[in-house]
Amino acid sequence: MSDIVEKTLTALPGLFLQNQPGGGPSAAKASFSSRLGSLVRGITALTSKHEEEKLIQQELSSLKATVSAPTTTLKTMKECMVRLIYCEMLGYDASFGYIHAIKLAQQGNLLEKRVGYLAVSLFLHESHELLLLLVNTVVKDLQSTNLVEVCMALTVVSQIFPQEMIPAVLPLIEDKLQHSKEIIRRKAVLALYKFHLIAPNQVQHIHIKFRKALCDRDVGVMAASLHIYLRMIKENSSGYKDLTGSFVTILKQVVGGKLPVDFNYHSVPAPWLQIQLLRILGLLGKDDQRSSVLKRSLKNCVLLG
């Protein structure tokens, strides 16, 4: 266990404190490691639950005083937020920090905003009243020219977003399906998949754009769209039988090794993508078992796989 803890503590500063101004990365990492590291090491060294509770309560009291102080900087707030996340991961209530996580996402620089968004996605649920305070920030970041801010906004939308506020961001996310950067298009598809799960009626009008995503030149965007199609075909397979040929073509490309090697797993071409496609084809052919196209595609998959 100690080796795992040490490796985790070594990696965390690089995740949260890249390109720090001022004292430089080394000073920031040292500060980060000394505070979070001492907390983690202190907990792992304890021998009873009672001792853990006592230590965590002391830590939470200290953190509450720090985040509530008007002189606390955003840099310090970011470091406190990471420790609050760790305390909540252990099952302790850190609800006093929720509003500060939202403020960090609203006011911080890129790294601080990153931690703020992360904390919000971990702390809150979709019906939490505080989540409404984040909507304007998400809208602003979706309209940003900074790709990192757009990515962060799309990520938090695909994880947690109030259903009643979907109309406020839906047009912006639709536009992102045409973005020149594939990572933006991919995250936009995942955000729309989230919307389809929680409010399918609000995304029915953009099914034609889902079809464009299925034919996207980027494999990641195409793969993300399969989640939406699997869900929709489960609900109404007859409405998508015209796409059978497209799914068969994609499957043949996958098993034929036409995808980048990054998608291979132990020399198997994109196995999870194959599973998704086979599930979709199985649903489309459920009421038409004699479909020769489906039978040939499945046979080819077995022979080539």
Image (spheres, rainbow, N blue to C red):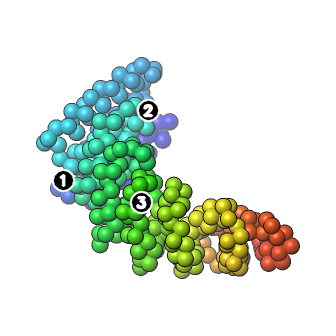
Spot occupied by residue 231 in the image (x, y as percentages of width and height): 62, 61
| Residue 257 appears in the figure | no
Q: In front: mark 2 or mark 1?
A: 2
Q: Residue at x 33, y 26 (%)?
A: 57
Of the pair 92 and 237, the residue shown nearer to us: 237
Q: Which residue is mark 3?
A: 166
Q: Quick one: label 1, few (<14), some, or many (20+) residues within 10 Å? A: few
Of the pair 37 and 216, the residue shown nearer to us: 216
SS at mark 3 in the image: helix
| Residue 51 appears in the figure | yes
Q: Amino acid at mark 3?
A: Ile
Q: Which residue is mark 1?
A: 23
Position of 19 relative to 77 (above/below): below
SS at mark 2 in the image: loop
The count of marks equals 3
Spot occupied by residue 293 in the image (x, y as percentages of width and height): 80, 78
Q: Amino acid at mark 2?
A: Gly
Spot occupied by residue 210 in the image (x, y as percentages of width and height): 55, 73
Residue 104's disc number: none
Position of 91 relative to 294 (above/below): above
Q: Residue at x 36, y 63 (%)?
A: 168
| In this rendering, position of residue 104 left or right of residue 266 | left
Q: Residue at x 40, y 70 (%)?
A: 171
Q: Earlier in the sequence, mark 1 or mark 3?
A: 1
Q: Which residue is mark 2?
A: 91
CA–CA distance in space, label 2 to label 1: 34 Å
Spot occupied by residue 107 in the image (x, y as percentages of width and height): 22, 55
Q: Are marks 2 and 3 in contact (CB under 8 Å)?
A: no
Position of 181 relative to 101 (above/below): below
